């Protein structure tokens, strides 16, 4: 796979800011794959493609869901932008000819996460959140550090931040967003705040 060709082909689908976020997510995905022993080529491809449908209009996203026969939940009907993840995965398969199921799943689950994500899914979910061009986020340094130590703990922190943010704004919450938080919190329960601090401070 020629990564530069793939970058060039997603660029026209995006505004400048989204394209810079895409390249930044690709870089962090590559680093996390290297650190955690995942296929770096798959991580790069998924990083480049994860937001390929993010700049689509709501109308367009709904049309694509009909075209690809993708189910649309109640919350997705209210917040159509959430569909950019599953439409992105359908596009990656149909337009960009990606047939690797793990890459497609990583694109599909990158916004809400899901319980029991594969290593590649976890990497894309996390890289998307911690890439350096993101606006300031609570505890971001702690989360970035944790992403290189323990992905499951980092995902718990990200999911918690997202739920706190959505609750504070009164946004409708997708069941998968809650299930992701609950699954990874239960998985990492022994990691108390003090344990996390010790990990973060470890050399
Ligand atoms: O596409 P990006 O901005 O790079 O990142 P993303 O695909 O992770 O989307 C992030 C946005 O999605 C962020 O504003 C929080 C929002 N989001 C995540 N889960 C839910 C949600 N929004 C709603 N309304 N409900 C959710 O369950
Ligand atoms: Fe996204
Ligand atoms: Fe993104």
Image (cartoon, rainbow, N blue to C red):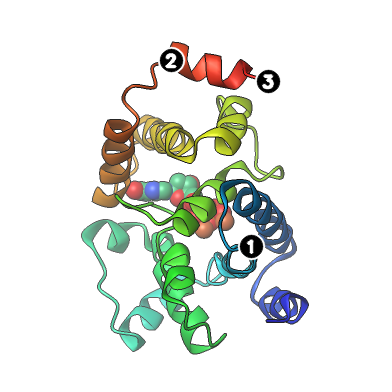
Residue pictured at 40% horizontal, 82% vertical:
64
How far apart marks 1 and 3 lie (CA) works out to: 25 Å
Tell me which numbered mark, 3 or 2, is placed earlier along the sequence.
2
- Is residue 77 in view? yes
Disc 3: CA contacts within 10 A as few (<14), some (14-19) or many (>=20): few
**Which residue corresponds to mark 1?**
40
- Is residue 172 in view? no
Residue 103 image position (x, y, % from top left) = 49, 70
Residue 128 image position (x, y, % from top left) = 57, 51
Disc 2: CA contacts within 10 A as few (<14), some (14-19) or many (>=20): few
Q: Quadrant of ligand 3?
A: bottom right
Between label 1 and label 2, give the one nearer the viewer. Answer: 1
- Which quadrant of the structure image shows residue 163? top left
Residue sitting nearer the eye, 195 or 109: 195
Q: Is residue 181 above or below residue 26?
A: above
**Which residue corresponds to mark 2?**
193
Most distant residue in the top direction: 194
Tell me which numbered mark, 1 or 3, is placed earlier along the sequence.
1
Residue pictured at 31% horizontal, 51% vertical:
116
Give the tally of numbered discs: 3
Of helix, strand and loop, which one carries label 1?
helix
Tell me which numbered mark, 1 or 2, is placed earlier along the sequence.
1
Residue 203 numbered mark, or none = 3
Disc 1: CA contacts within 10 A as few (<14), some (14-19) or many (>=20): some
């Amino acid at each position: 796979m020629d990564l530069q060709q793939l970058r060039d082909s997603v660029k026209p689908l995006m505004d400048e800011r989204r394209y810079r976020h895409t390249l930044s997510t690709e870089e962090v995905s590559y680093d996390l794959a290297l650190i955690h022993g995942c296929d770096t080529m798959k991580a790069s491809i998924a990083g480049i493609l994860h937001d390929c449908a993010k700049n689509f209009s709501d109308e367009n996203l709904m049309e694509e869901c009909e075209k690809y026969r993708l189910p649309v939940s109640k919350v997705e009907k209210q917040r159509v932008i959430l569909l950019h993840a599953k439409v992105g995965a359908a596009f990656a398969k149909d337009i960009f000819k990606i047939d690797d199921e793990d890459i497609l799943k990583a694109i599909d689950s990158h916004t809400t996460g899901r319980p029991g994500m594969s290593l590649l899914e976890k990497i894309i979910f996390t890289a998307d959140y911690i890439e350096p061009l993101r606006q300031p986020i609570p505890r971001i340094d702690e989360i970035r550090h944790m992403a290189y130590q323990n992905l499951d703990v980092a995902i718990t922190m990200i999911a918690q931040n997202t739920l706190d943010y959505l609750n504070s704004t009164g946004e409708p919450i997708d069941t998968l967003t809650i299930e992701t938080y609950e699954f990874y919190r239960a998985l990492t329960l022994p990691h108390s705040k003090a344990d996390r601090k010790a990990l973060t401070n470890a050399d």
